[in-house]
Image (tube, coloured by chain):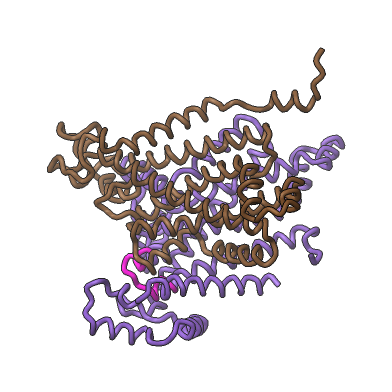
Chain colours: A purple, B brown
């Protein structure tokens, strides 16, 4: 069921994507080549993109090519989109995994601390810090950290250039700042949600019973409270990773990190429609997959959701 | 001895006044609104006026913060930027709430396939990460102020729709709506006269949140070079323009970024205060 729903969502997303990039602009060839294109160039571009056919036929053909992995050719560089994306996708995945590795455990731990010390000074400062982190633009955090650690202290490089064959420690150096920024951006929501769902569980009857039975505090939190918040926590983690998708676009641009997000920004600036479509669909795919995984995991963790609705 | 039901006493006690933080936020926000309205009057120089040949310098010709990367007065551009950034975000947030509330109430009042259709459409829109959605639309349509406003409004309308629909569904079960239906009032009457007045407090709080997100998305797009275009002064644009100055030891890029943060943090604090008040007061807990 859930897989079907995810597939349907992707189909609608692809339809929206196609409509936004190939139907809304009116004449795509004009949009790509700009206002001052010669009529011959326009005709050639229309021919190359197959614009003489009606939109729904183009959509079906486009979708078919996407499905077999033919992403077309970039209109600005003429290279196949697949080769352009390959390395960038790997770099973005490295960044995302590194962030997830740091952010998820840290956020859960902070949420746990805030919840077990609810309404104390620790809790309040964590809450306020999280509120501020949500309200501040990603690029502000990014350039603030650059200013502090690259310019003032000169500890870390401010831009990331990942080359093949560079040493691991170089890569790590270049990853630290982007990962730190993404972690800050992404963690805020997770900390708050973890805290709130844990506080709810901790105030329920069976926890009180456990306390009255004299079970040690740590044992209560780990074995009585945590299993009951596993299901919301899976959802929260997936949400965290979903925020990563948006955050990655900005952070990659700030640090000149050669990833998919920056590729997409460049593609939009250059009106490179096939490249935009490919990057957009990859981001959507990741996003939908994450949400689906969260759904499945939280169902597995919560027996009450397992019964068919 | 007066006889007052215990719950009423409790309610009056627990209804908090605005705290110091919220009042501070209101002062900051009103300050920025005044600046945005009065920018041409109070700015010492024009929006794109070059006052010095030196970039990132504290020259006597320029205002307090010195010059930007082109030798323009930073303070003047900040003041004009308030106008652009807050104005564009306001337009997007208003449009988003208009679309979201109208469709949300419509879905609640009419129900049935209208509700199904609208809700599935919103689900589909939500399956795009918001920044990616904006990038795709701007990639297709090119960038211009109307495109930015509509794009951001569309992204935000999804959240507004969900809240309006949930509020509408709660209120639709009330007796006064049944009474209005029995009188034969139209769907429009029910939406505007029965539901809207009773949902106004949470919707106002929601508008505040939409506004913060709108500022964040608009300035992020401008920062990426895909939103407001230079030479217009916009805080996101200013961060992008002056980011190189960081390496010359000039904090010119940090100032507009801090301005954005001051507006969004203020709005968030005010919204929080309103929600807290609403919770303790007459409006039942309706916001998630």
Q: Is residue A169 visible?
A: no
- Residue placed furthest toward the front: B183
Q: Is residue A247 above or below residue B76?
A: below
Q: Nearer the viewer, residue A138 or B247?
A: A138
Lateral position of residue B65 relative to residue B215, left or right = left
Which residue is pictured at 52% across the width and 82% down the height?
A: A67
Horizontal relation, residue A41 to residue A95: left or right = left
In the picture as drawn, the residue positioned furthest to the left comes out as B53
Q: How far from the left and from the top, in percent, is residue A268?
A: 36, 66
Magenta stretch: residue A205 in it? Answer: no
**A41 shown above or below A239:** below
Please provide percent x and percent y for residue A282: 49, 70
Residue at the (66%, 74%) spot, across then down: A4
In the rendering, at what x and y percent does residue A259 appear?
Answer: 41, 64
In the foreground, B97 or A191: B97
Considering the whole magenta stretch, tell me its main secondary structure. Answer: helix
Tell me the quarter of the image containing the N terminus of chain B. Answer: top right
Splitting the image into 4 quarters, where does residue A42 fall? bottom left
- Residue A276 on the magenta segment: yes
Residue A309 pos. (x, y %): 79, 65
Range of residues picked out in magenta: A265-277
């Amino acid at each position: 069921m859930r897989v079907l729903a995810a597939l349907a969502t992707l189909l609608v997303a692809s339809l929206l994507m196609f409509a936004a990039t190939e139907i809304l602009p009116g004449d795509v060839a004009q949009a790509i080549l700009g206002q001052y294109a010669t009529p011959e160039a326009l005709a050639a571009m229309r021919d190359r993109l197959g614009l003489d056919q009606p939109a729904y036929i183009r959509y079906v053909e486009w979708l078919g090519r996407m499905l077999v992995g033919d992403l077309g050719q970039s209109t600005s560089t003429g290279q196949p989109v697949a080769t352009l994306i390959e390395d960038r996708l790997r770099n973005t995945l490295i960044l995302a995994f590194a962030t997830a590795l740091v952010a998820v455990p840290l956020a859960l731990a902070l949420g746990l601390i805030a919840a077990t010390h609810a309404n104390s000074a620790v809790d309040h400062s964590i809450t306020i810090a999280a509120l501020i982190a949500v309200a501040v633009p990603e690029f502000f955090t990014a350039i603030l950290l650059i200013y502090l650690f690259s310019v003032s202290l000169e500890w870390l490089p401010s831009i990331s250039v990942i080359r093949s064959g560079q040493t691991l420690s170089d890569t790590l150096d270049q990853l630290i700042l982007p990962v730190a920024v993404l972690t800050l951006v992404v963690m805020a929501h997770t900390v708050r949600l973890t805290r709130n769902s844990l506080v709810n569980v901790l105030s329920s009857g069976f926890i009180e019973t456990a306390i009255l039975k004299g079970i040690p505090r740590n044992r209560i939190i780990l074995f009585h409270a945590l299993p009951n918040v596993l299901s919301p926590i899976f959802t929260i983690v997936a949400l965290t990773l979903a925020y990563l998708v948006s955050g990655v676009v900005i952070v990659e641009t700030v640090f000149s990190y050669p990833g998919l997000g920056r590729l997409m920004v460049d593609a939009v600036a250059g009106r490179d429609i096939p490249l935009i479509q490919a990057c957009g669909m990859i981001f959507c795919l990741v996003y939908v997959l994450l949400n689906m995984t969260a759904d499945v995991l939280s169902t597995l963790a919560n027996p009450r959701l397992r019964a068919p609705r | 001895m007066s006889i007052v039901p215990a719950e009423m006493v409790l309610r009056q006690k627990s209804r908090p006044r605005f705290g110091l933080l919220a009042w501070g936020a209101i002062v900051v926000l009103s300050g920025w609104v005044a600046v945005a309205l009065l920018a041409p009057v109070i700015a010492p120089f024009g929006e794109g006026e070059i006052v010095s040949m030196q970039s990132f310098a504290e020259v006597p010709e320029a205002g307090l913060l010195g010059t930007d990367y082109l030798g323009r007065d930073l303070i003047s551009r900040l003041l004009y930027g308030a106008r652009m950034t807050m104005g564009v975000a306001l337009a997007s947030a208003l449009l988003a709430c208009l679309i979201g509330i109208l469709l949300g109430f419509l879905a609640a009042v009419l129900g049935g396939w209208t509700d199904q259709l609208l809700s599935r459409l919103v689900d589909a829109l939500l399956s795009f990460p918001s920044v990616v959605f904006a990038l795709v639309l701007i990639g297709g349509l090119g960038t211009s102020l109307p495109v930015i406003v509509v794009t951001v409004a569309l992204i935000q309308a999804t959240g507004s729709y969900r809240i309006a629909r949930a509020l509408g569904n709660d209120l639709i079960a009330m007796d006064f709506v049944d009474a209005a239906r029995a009188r034969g009032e139209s769907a429009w009457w029910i939406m505007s006269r029965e539901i809207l007045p009773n949902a106004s407090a949470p919707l106002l709080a929601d508008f505040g949140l939409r506004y913060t997100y709108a500022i964040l998305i608009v300035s992020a797009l401008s920062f990426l070079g895909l939103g407001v275009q230079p030479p217009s002064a916009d805080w996101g644009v200013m961060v992008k323009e002056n980011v190189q100055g960081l390496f010359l030891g000039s904090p010119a890029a940090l100032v507009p970024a801090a301005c954005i943060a001051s507006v969004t943090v203020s709005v968030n604090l005010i919204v929080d205060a309103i929600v807290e008040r609403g919770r303790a007061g007459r409006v039942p807990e309706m916001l998630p």
